Amino acid sequence: MLFSLPSYGLDREVKTSRDVVIANLKVSMVIYHDDATNIDFSVADKIYSTVDELERFMQSEGVSEEYCKQIDLEIFLIPYDTLNNRDTMWFLNWSAWNNANILGMYDSKFHSGKRGSIYVAADQGDLIRDRTLAHELVHFWQDITCNRSGDLEVLAMRFERHMTSQ
């Protein structure tokens, strides 16, 4: 599969993939990025270790670990300007953020619930990228476990802080 967003092309495909377990579900996770984001494959290892820590964190929070739907996950590490380009990212619900620029987001609606996608601005520094990935991974967890109770943002922000304190 080639990395493709409407109006956004790459000279070459750069990706890594691995099967991971999230919420007792085997998930095929594919990470895409382009040369412009200056990402090396240690970032993929960081993402996989964040997934492992997410499992432990959710257990300690008493959050459901039973999945209700099976979807695979794609992670797009893209430049901030691309992420916030309204023409390129037309399929995002910009009104949900009061039309403000964002650092990342999770979506499974664009692909009719068959695939989850995380989009992260990868060129805003390692700390911001890693915190944003952690935050959006919680939203993926919430999606596959059909967890709609409580404030969904609070748990994502707590996991962000948890990962920063590691």
Image (tube, helix red, strand yellow):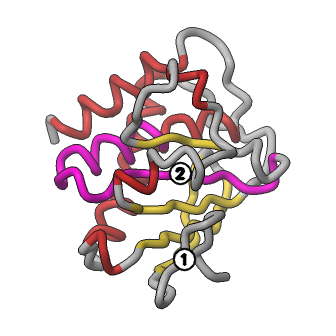
Residue 145 point in image, percent of width and height:
69, 35
In this image, 30 relative to 135: left or right?
right
The residue type indicated by label 2 comes to Ile
Residue indicated by mark 1 = 9
Q: Residue at x 36, y 24 (%)?
A: 157
Residue 31 point in image, percent of width and height:
49, 70
Q: Residue at x 73, y 56 (%)?
A: 115
Residue 34 point in image, percent of width and height:
40, 76
Would you identify the image quadrant in which residue 162 lies? top left
Query: What is the residue that sits farthest to the bottom in this orientation?
Result: 12
Quarter occupied by the N terminus: bottom right
- Residue in the foreground of this view, choosing between 149 and 74: 74
In this image, 96 relative to 12: left or right?
right
The residue type indicated by label 1 comes to Gly
Vertical comparison of 84 with 10: above or below = above
Tell me the SS state at disc 2: strand
Residue indicated by mark 2 = 118
